[in-house]
Image (cartoon, rainbow, N blue to C red):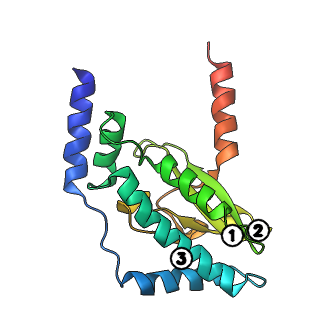
C-alpha cells in the first residue's frame, strides 16, 4: 500500500512538470553542441567535435525509440521500475551514450561518467560527460538527455548547478564503504 502511495505521488508530481522546451531546431542545436565541444580547449579536433555532437543527437533519437519515451522523466522512470518499459533510467542514458561515443575512438576527446549523489530533495542522478583529452570531468560538458525526456541537454559540468556532479567511481566507492560499515 505504501509503495502504491509513493508511486501515485511521483506520478502526480511528474505530471505537473514537463521537459523544458529547448530553443532552436535540431541541426542548429547540434552545431551549437559541436561548437561547445570544440571550445573545451586547444587541441580538440573540429571534426571530432562535430562527430561527437552528431552521434549524441542521432543516438539520443534512437534511444528515445528503443526506450519507448513518451512521458516526462519521472513518469518514464516509474514505468521502467514497474516493468512497463525496458530502459530509460538516467544511468541507462549515461551508460548507453558513453558506450556509443566510445565506439568513435576519439583522439582529442575523453568520456567520463558522473553521478550526483542523492540529496534531501533529489534522487541520485547519472550522466555522461565529454571533455578535452586529458582533462577531468569537471572541465567537460554534461550530456544528459534524461532530464529533458529525450532531448539532448548539455552544459559545462561546473555551470550545471542543478546537480553536484562527482566522478562515478568516487560515488560508488563511498557507497561500498558505507555498505561495508553497516551492521
Quickly name the residue at label 1.
131
Residue 8 lies, in percent from the top left, at 20, 36
Q: Where is residue 155 in the image (x, y as percent from the top left)?
A: 53, 71
Vertical order, 139 against 77 (above or below): below
Residue at figure coordinates x 55%, y 76% from the top left: 53
Q: Residue 135 carries which label?
A: 2
Residue under the point 61% across and 58% down: 98
Q: Earlier in the sequence, mark 2 or mark 3?
A: 3
- Tell which tag, 3 or 1, sits nearer the viewer: 3
Q: Residues within 10 Å of mark 2 (few under 14, many from 20)?
A: some
Crowding near pointer 1: few (<14 within 10 Å), some, many (20+)?
A: many
Relative to the observer, which residue lies in front, 88 or 170?
A: 88
Residue on which the image places disc 3: 54
Q: Relative to 28, is 110 on the left or the right?
A: right
Q: Residues within 10 Å of mark 3 (few under 14, many from 20)?
A: some
Q: Where is residue 1 in the image (x, y as percent from the top left)?
A: 21, 20
Q: Where is residue 96 in the image (x, y as percent from the top left)?
A: 54, 53
Amino acid at each position: 500500500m505504501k509503495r502504491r502511495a509513493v508511486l501515485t505521488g511521483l506520478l502526480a508530481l511528474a505530471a505537473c512538470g514537463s521537459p523544458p522546451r529547448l530553443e532552436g531546431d535540431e541541426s542548429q542545436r547540434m552545431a551549437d553542441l559541436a561548437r561547445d565541444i570544440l571550445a573545451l580547449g586547444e587541441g580538440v579536433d573540429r571534426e571530432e567535435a562535430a562527430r561527437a555532437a552528431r552521434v549524441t543527437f542521432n543516438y539520443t533519437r534512437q534511444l528515445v525509440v528503443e526506450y519507448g519515451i513518451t512521458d516526462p522523466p519521472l513518469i518514464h522512470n516509474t514505468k521502467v521500475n514497474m516493468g512497463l518499459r525496458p530502459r530509460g533510467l538516467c544511468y541507462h542514458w549515461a551508460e548507453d551514450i558513453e558506450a556509443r561515443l566510445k565506439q568513435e575512438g576519439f583522439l582529442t576527446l575523453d568520456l567520463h561518467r558522473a553521478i550526483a549523489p542523492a540529496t534531501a530533495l533529489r534522487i541520485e542522478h547519472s550522466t555522461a560527460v565529454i571533455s578535452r583529452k586529458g582533462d577531468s570531468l569537471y572541465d567537460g560538458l554534461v550530456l544528459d538527455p534524461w532530464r529533458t525526456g529525450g532531448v539532448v541537454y548539455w552544459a559545462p559540468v561546473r555551470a550545471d548547478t542543478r546537480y553536484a556532479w562527482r566522478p562515478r567511481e568516487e560515488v560508488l566507492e563511498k557507497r561500498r564503504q558505507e555498505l561495508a560499515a553497516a551492521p
